[in-house]
Image (cartoon, rainbow, N blue to C red):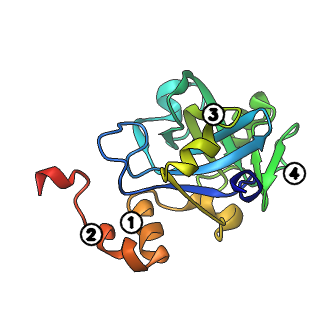
Amino acid sequence: MISEKLRKGHLLIAEPSIVGDLSFNRSVILLADHNKEGSVGFIINKPLKYTINDLIPEICARFKIYNGGPVEQDNLYFIHNIPNLIPNSIEISNGIYWGGDFESTKALINDGKINKDNIRFFLGYTGWDENQLENEMLENSWIITENNYENKIIGKSATHFWQEQIKELGGEYLIWSNAPENPYLN
């Protein structure tokens, strides 16, 4: 059963067939929570034009902001790998944590104790209601994989991440790793 395969910390890789969907075309999503009521994740490979300093001027850092998904895009979220520094964090899996005390986080960034390999910021998140993600899995919209990068995924470059994941799948997916983002323009 699909629901048993889905777990916090897994990666959801958009099937190459998702073309034209602005939010999810070539997306890789870190599944932050999955339970019988629904699922929450963050698109980890879609950087925006903003940095954290653009959104919160009192933070003296230029960390990129990512499009976390189409839900609540006016809210800022973050994942990190330093729960010992950021109180009230929630473990996702494999040493990756979600949120925590934001005032402490701001101070730690300004003090140089947090770098871009420790934290990733998102505007919005990706959410699914009960059974919605399972239905999308049945429609072959997503490929589930383990997060083999564990907490180092936070510092991973987003530039070619979807293509890298597709190459690792091999087989019938190899042809898609070099395809243009919009195959209709080829």
| Disc nearer the start of the sequence (4/3) | 4
Q: Give the percent coordinates (x, y) of residue 124.
A: 56, 29
The reply to whether the C-beta atoms of the residues labelled 2 and 4 are less than 8 Å apart is no
- Residue depicted at 71% across the width and 49% down the height: 80
Quote the CA–CA distance across marks 4 and 3: 30 Å
Q: Position of residue 50 (x, y in %)?
A: 42, 34
Of badges 2 and 4, the one in the foreground is: 2
- Indicate the secondary structure of the residue bearing disc 1: helix
Q: Which quadrant of the rendered structure holds the N terminus? A: bottom right
Tell me what residue is drawn at x 65 percent, y 65 percent.
147
Which label is found at residue 128?
A: 3
Q: Is residue 79 above or below residue 152?
A: above
CA gap between label 2 and label 4 equals 41 Å
Which residue shows up at 81% across the image and 32% down it? 101
Around disc 1, counting alpha carbons within 10 Å, would you say few (fewer than 14), some (14 to 19), or many (20 or more)?
Answer: many
* Amino acid under disc 1: Gln
Q: What residue sits right under mark 2 in the picture?
A: 178
Distance CA(mark 1)–CA(mark 4): 33 Å
Q: Nearer the viewer, residue 55 or 41?
A: 41
